[in-house]
Structures are given as structure tokens and as C-alpha cells.
Amino acid sequence: MQLEGMNETAHTPTITLADIVAKTSDLPSLPAAALAVMRETDSPTGTAQSIARYLSQDQALTARILRLANSAYYGLSRQIIDVSDAVVVLGMRCIRNLCMVASTYPWMIKPLKGYGLGPREMWTHSFAVAVGAQLVASRSRASSADQAFTAGLLHNLGKVALSIWLEDKLPGMLAIACREGLTFDQVERKVLGFDHCDVGAHMGEGWNLPKPLVEAMQFHHNPNACDPTNSLVDCVHVADYLTMSMGLGLGGDGLRYDFQEEALARLGLTSDHFDELAESFMVAYEQHEKLFEDAA
């Protein structure tokens, strides 16, 4: 996939990965309740009661989840009025996804000028990758569809922290990408010495996220570098490329995306399967968008 770029020269690195986390104000975070729900749904001992109990400790998060649960997407015949009811009616896995959506939506809808992304464009891309990764995981049966959704939603977390540091560098970085035929993450490494994948993985480790999710943040542009390979990373890589191909939330990454076909092979999929996924993707994405018709 290739779009046109601009031109300029590389800058000497002036910040470190530690600076990004230490000096960036208003870093995004996941509520403690959301992290607890993620752990509970991944645990064989997790129950609907324990999930409802954790969520009830965060009233703001609960309110957002209930708005989503009552959206047109689910088309329920009655209104869900409390989180315990939501877990029973929709199920633990569904509530996990709603919890992640409700937790990330407020800070993902902000513009990211350092990546050329306007309001909601980061969210559009991340949510689309979440839907796509869930679809790929379900089709390949190589990974948990719910974990794939979460990994897709969080894969570009590092951009939220790194954007402000790139605002004055963006024209030059776009120029380098165009002149040297590099992807934007490659330009990040050339200019800074690290990229948004590194920043996201660093933040994910700080949140004590499971290793497979952290690896999805770290290697989603280069799944072949993940050793040993991780099917969750492969699902997100395929979904990321699929989303970019559809033109959803391109930003700097829209200049070029290097797709690693080995990821498809590791998932037991072929180029024909990819074409089928592409046909199913927009239908699934548009259906999921109904979550926000009367919510969030």
C-alpha cells in the first residue's frame, strides 16, 4: 500500500523512551476496574459476579458501559439498568470488550497532530483494527477473539504518548519517508532511535498487561521479529494492514505499510482467505459502529 509523502532531513535524537513516559503530561491510562475485568475474563476462576463487583467500583466506567450496552447494536427488547444485569444478558466476554471500548474512547478521540490525525481518526483506526483482529482470530482459530479485540484496540497506544513530541518534526519525517521509501515507524526509529511500538510496549508493561498484548503493541508492524512468534501479533498485523487498505485513520502510517505475508501463513490463511476477510471486514465494522449511535 503506497500513498504520496513530503520531504526533509533527519533530526538528531533529542529525547529518550524514558523521557516520553516521564515528561509527557496527561498520559492515557486504563482504569483499575478495566484491568481487573481483563484479568478476570482471562482467568478460569473468573465469574460474572466478580466482574460485576469490579465494575461497580468505578461509577463513571459503569455508566459508559451501560450506554454502550443499551445501544442500537444489541437491539435488546428491554433496557439494561445495572452492570450485573449487563454481564448476565451480554456475557462476560462481551462486557470485557465494552469495558475496553469505554475505557479507551475518551482519550482516543483526541487529535494526534504528530501523526497527522484529526479528531476521532485515531479512534476510528484503532476500533477498526480491533474489529478486524477479532474477525481474523475467529476465522483462523489461532487466537482468542476477545484478546485479539483488546490487542487491536491498544496496538497504537504509543502514538497517544509520542504525538506531542513529533508535531514539529512531522513535515521532515514525511519528507524522509517519501524520499527514502520508508514506512513511518522506520522514520521514527531513524529520527528518534525508537518508534511508537516501543513506546506502547513500554506503557503496556507499566500497566502490567499480559505479555501477548504487550507483544502485539511491540511487533504489530514487524510480526516476524517476535520470537517466538505470537498468533495475537499476527492477527493484529493482518487487521492493521486490512484497516489501512480500507483507508481508515491513515495518518503518517498511510504513507506506506509493509505487509508480512508470513503472518497470514502462520495463521493458516492464504491470500484467498485475505480477500474473503476484506469482504467481511467493512460489514463487521459498520455493524459495530452502531455501538455509538445512541452511546458514548
Image: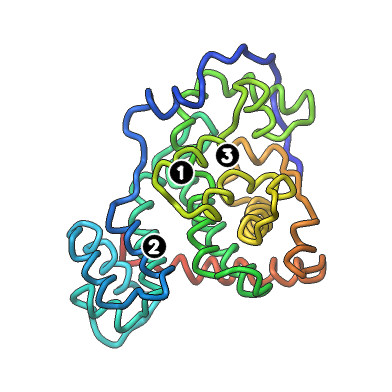
SS under mark 3:
helix
Q: CA distance from mark 3 to mark 2?
A: 21 Å
Q: CA distance from mark 2 to mark 1?
A: 15 Å
Seen at 50% across and 52% down, the residue is 124
Which of 263/105 is in front? 263
Could you say where residue 256 lies in the image, as x and y percent from the top left? 72, 40
Q: Earlier in the sequence, mark 2 or mark 1?
A: 2
Q: Amino acid at mark 2?
A: Met
Q: Amino acid at mark 3?
A: Cys
Please indicate whether residue 134 sits to the left or right of residue 92 in the image. Answer: right
Query: Circle 1: is it few (<14), some (14-19), or many (20+) Cα within 10 Å?
Result: some
Seen at 39% across and 46% down, the residue is 207
Query: Circle 2: is it few (<14), some (14-19), or many (20+) Cα within 10 Å?
Result: many
Q: CA distance from mark 3 to mark 1?
A: 12 Å
Could you say where residue 159 lies in the image, as x and y percent from the top left? 50, 37
| Residues under numbered marks 3 and 2 in contact, where contact means CB atoms less than 8 Å apart | no
Figure check: 78 above or below 205: below
SS under mark 1:
helix
- Quarter of the image for residue 5 reads top right
SS under mark 2:
helix
Could you say where residue 185 lies in the image, as x and y percent from the top left? 65, 34
Seen at 45% across and 26% down, the residue is 20
Could you say where residue 24 lies in the image, as x and y percent from the top left? 38, 27
Seen at 33% across and 48% down, the residue is 106
Residue marked by disc 3: 197
Residue marked by disc 2: 38
Q: Earlier in the sequence, mark 3 or mark 1?
A: 3
Which of 135/118 is in front? 135
Residue marked by disc 1: 205
Q: Amino acid at mark 1?
A: Glu
